[in-house]
Amino acid sequence: MTITVTHSYRALLGAALAVGILSLAGCGDGGPNMVPVSGVVLLDGQPLDYGHIQVIPADWRPASGQIGKDGRFTLTTTEPNDGCAVGTHKVAILAGESITAETTRWHAPAKYADIQTSNLTVNITGPTDDLKIELQSDGTQLYRGPKLESQIPEGGTENSGFQFSE
């Protein structure tokens, strides 16, 4: 059996090969230039020891990171620790700890939890491990102590052991 390749078949094969090569060499996911970013969040000059940071590009996926006990964070967008898109972006610091369905303990002023009220921006120009986000409490009463815990004995108790005042 003999297969004869015609001119039109060669043209079709060439076009299919060109499309395949172009798709392999394409622009990936079409995203912006990403760079590794880590840093520290400070509240009144001291490390914020609870919460998450969100960096919100206007035209790409947000980057986020957990804030550690030392105030440090590393940003992730799509892959662990891949960083953030280059550019100037709005920032939110989510530092509200849910105590009950109705109660939130704020470790930083609630205004920082919303990009519309935080007034925080970062300008990411390249890889960095020393991005500093500085927050101010502005006299806002914040929780700054250890978590309150109590052991309730079997059978219950009428005294929690905590002293409360109004």
Image: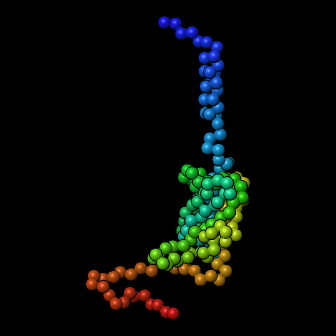
Please provide percent x and percent y for residue 151.
35, 80
Q: Position of residue 90 (x, y in %)?
A: 68, 63
Q: Residue at x 67, y 54 (%)?
A: 59
On screen, residue 149 versus residue 72, left or right, reads left
Relative depth, front residue between 136 and 4: 4
Q: Does residue 1 appear left or right of residue 90 in this picture?
A: left
Name of the residue lying farthest toward the front = 8
* Front one among 34 and 36: 34
Kindly give the residue lying farthest to the bottom in the view shown.
166
Q: Residue furthest left?
A: 155
Question: Which residue is at 56% across, 65% downward?
Answer: 52
Q: Is residue 34 left or right of residue 162?
A: right
Q: In the image, residue 72 lies at what x, y percent?
A: 59, 64
For image coordinates 48% across by 78% down, the residue present is: 102
Residue 105 position, x and y percent, is: 52, 77
Type of colouring:
rainbow
Image quadrant where residue 69 sits: bottom right
Q: In front here: 150 or 89?
A: 89
Instruction: Give the total number of marks visible in the rendering.
Output: 0
Quadrant of residue 39 in the image?
bottom right
Q: Residue at x 54, y 73 (%)?
A: 96
Q: Quadrant of residue 64?
A: bottom right
Q: Is residue 8 visible?
A: yes
Rendered position, 18 above or below 2: below
Residue 49 at least partly seen: no
